[in-house]
Image (cartoon, rainbow, N blue to C red):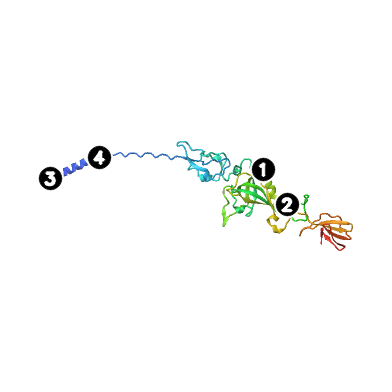
Amino acid sequence: MPRIFIILAIALILSGGTWYWFHSLKSAPTAVRPAAAPSAPPVPRVLVAAVDLPTGTLLSTESLKWQAWTPGVPTDPYLAEGKVKSQDYVGAVTRLHLTPGQPILPDAVVLPGDKSFMAAVLAPGMRAITINVGPTTSVAGFARPGDRVDLLLTTSIDRLDQDGQILRYYPTLKATETILTNLRLLGADQTISDPRPPAPGGTAPPHTVTLEVTPKQAEIISVASDRGGLSLVLHSLAGSNTDIVRHVTRTYEDEAIPGLGIIGPHSLRPLPIMTLVRGSDATELAMAPYGATGVRRQQNQNPTNVTVTVNGDSGGSGSGASSSGGIVH
């Protein structure tokens, strides 16, 4: 009997302790975890001019930068980060003058491929003209948009005597002339900001180039392109300036190759004159160079007796001398 009371007492104690422990946990205050502070919204940024950009400037990576915008102020209509990429505007041209830090509006630039892109590239008062070129006349494609070049004309010219008359008995003379200098190259083929895509084994030379010129220079190029072949000469980047002048120089083929022995119009000397006397009539003939024909002055071609005089000296007489085309044989 006493053992049963002992067991009951222990059971009551354990159950009471369990109830007390459970009740104390239930009534204990719950620790409040502090709420996390809200994160600050990202600061918006817009595309701005990194340097002074006059009208007609071709944009590069150094021309643009991202700049923080005032929080809470809408970024429209500017070019906001996340909506556009700065790289998309490299190669564009400014329509307006942009100062450093000025936000760029979409209408302030002309993107490559736009119809008015070439007109935006031109400086005020200037014109664009395109000429045909080849690998050897375009500096093998090394002349790129933005470079400065000279323009050469290679052609054949007639030789003139002291009176300005064409010497038919002389062959024509090859000459090359620098007709225009320091021209800005605007584009190669239809590419303005970048060279042509590389071809296997190197960069493919262009078939045409477009130059920035004055109206008068456009007329000069148009006439010269019909007169002979045009070639480009590339300027150094270090020594090039922006002044466009016409500095004419000329080289004749006898200057380039003295061994030819050709007499150019700048050093023309008189040819020996041969007088062919036939009875009472005389014919003056020029002793023309090899391969040339021509007569200075001819009076009669029905001889009986013939006397040949070279520069006033009698060379003989007879009835067997003959002439053809003004040249005595």
For residue 266, side relative to residue 108 (left or right): right
CA–CA distance in space, label 4 to label 1: 97 Å
CA–CA distance in space, label 2 to label 4: 120 Å
Along the line of sight, the residue nearer the viewer: 70 or 142: 142
Local crowd size for mark 2, using a 10 Å CA cut-off: few (<14), some (14–19), many (≥20): few
The residue singled out by tag 3 in the image is 6
Q: Residue at x 23, y 39 (%)?
A: 24
Along the line of sight, the residue nearer the viewer: 116 or 212: 212
Q: Pick whichever of labels 4 and 1 is earlier in the sequence.
A: 4
CA–CA distance in space, label 2 to label 1: 31 Å
CA–CA distance in space, label 4 to label 3: 30 Å
The residue singled out by tag 4 in the image is 26
Name which quarter of the figure residue 291 lies in: bottom right
Q: Amino acid at mark 3?
A: Ile
Q: Amino acid at mark 4?
A: Lys
Q: Residue at x 66, y 43 (%)?
A: 215
Q: Pick whichever of labels 2 and 4 is earlier in the sequence.
A: 4
Q: Amino acid at mark 2?
A: His
Q: Position of residue 94 (x, y in %)?
A: 56, 41
Q: Amino acid at mark 1?
A: Pro
Does 145 sit above or below residue 24? below
Q: Which mark is residue 266?
A: 2
Q: Residue at x 15, y 44 (%)?
A: 10
